[in-house]
Amino acid sequence: MLRSHLSRYAIKVLFLFSLLGMHLAHAEEVVVYSARIEQLIKPMFDAFTQETGIKVKYTTDNEGALLARLEAEGKNTPADMLITADVGNLWAAARAGLLKPVKSEVLENNIPAHLQDPQNEWFGLSIRARTLVYNTKKVKPSELSTYEDLADPKWNKRLCLRTSKKVYNQSLVAMMIAEHGEAETEKIVRGWVANLATDPLSDDTRALEFVASGKCDVTLVNTYYYGRLMKKDPKLPLAIFWPNQNNGGVHVNISGAGVTRYSRNEQAAIKLLEFLSSEKAQNLFADVNMEYPANPRIAADPFVAAWGSFKQNPMNLAKAGELQTAAVKLMDRAGYR
Ligand code: FE
């Protein structure tokens, strides 16, 4: 009698210890350096902590500052994960030895091959489509066809472009080099420059405003900038056109993440990365910035989905990194400032 009472007591104690053990294991923490602003990441981190008990600490800054910091901190970095927009930045981080390969069936299953590093050092988490937007009073959609066609003289003094200094158009031109080769791409970019209605503009929103006010007829932007503007003023005479639907597809880019080379909480960081690719986080991750989920099993936000579906360029985005320097030099030669 006493013995069985004692062993029952022992079992209770063991049970309590195991609860405590679980609790300790869950007091893990992941430190994230993020070039995505707080409002674009916090909702997903909160959901992750709620599900796993793993805390997420984060620092946000621009990508240049975060990469410099990772590099300076080296082995002593507190960061476990880097989140940033544009594959050019992720590629540069991998190239600088700041990320480490992650083997994960969950990620392989959730993220299409062209949106992740062939060496598994970065993974796309949302898709940004860089497409054509035109003035509906001045252009018929039947006049539009491809990125390349914007070099045709029929667009003379009708095109607006964002500056070539921003990584977005560098990535686009890099992917065009991968597709057409340098000589052909340079011809196209020279054609664009010849068709400009105004000097290159500081950002996508400004390019859209120029099109809306009739200073030019067509431009090249990421769709979420169009979404932001149209939410503010749905009457603007702007519409999206999906180019290259019979050849190549729409140029897409990503926001994405990787685990840092010197992460001390690698397993927890991988869990967070997997969570961000999952159904639960994908809607949030894409919707908060009006982007498209990278996981093809998840539907886009209805406001975004209303812009229509499109075929995306299936070429691996690593090319945008590999050819970025070539793209920058090419744009410079072509007089694209
Ligand atoms: Fe942007």
Image: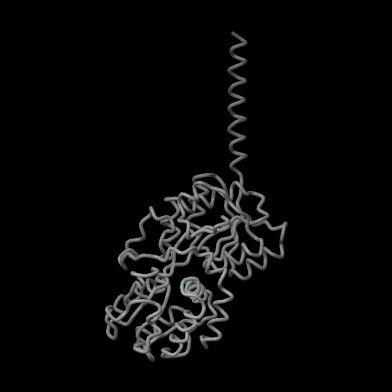
Q: Nearer the viewer, residue 62 or 120?
A: 120
Residue furthest top as drawn: 1
Instruction: Provide residue 62's location: percent of width, then percent of height.
Output: 58, 70
Instruction: Provide residue 181's location: percent of width, then percent of height.
Output: 50, 75
- Rendered image quadrant of residue 27: top right
Q: Nearer the viewer, residue 254 or 324?
A: 324
- Rendered image quadrant of residue 325: bottom right
Identified at 43% across, 85% down, the residue is 192
Identified at 72% across, 57% down, the residue is 75
Q: Quadrant of the N terminus?
A: top right
- Rendered image quadrant of residue 148: bottom left
Q: How is the image coloured?
A: one colour
Number of labels in the image equals 0
Instruction: Provide residue 114's location: percent of width, then percent of height.
Output: 47, 60
Q: Nearer the viewer, residue 293 or 290?
A: 293
With respect to residue 206, does 317 lie above or below?
above
- Residue 205 is left or right of residue 22, and the answer is left
Identified at 60% across, 56% down, the residue is 81
With respect to residue 10, does 189 lie above or below?
below
Identified at 61% across, 49% down, the residue is 29
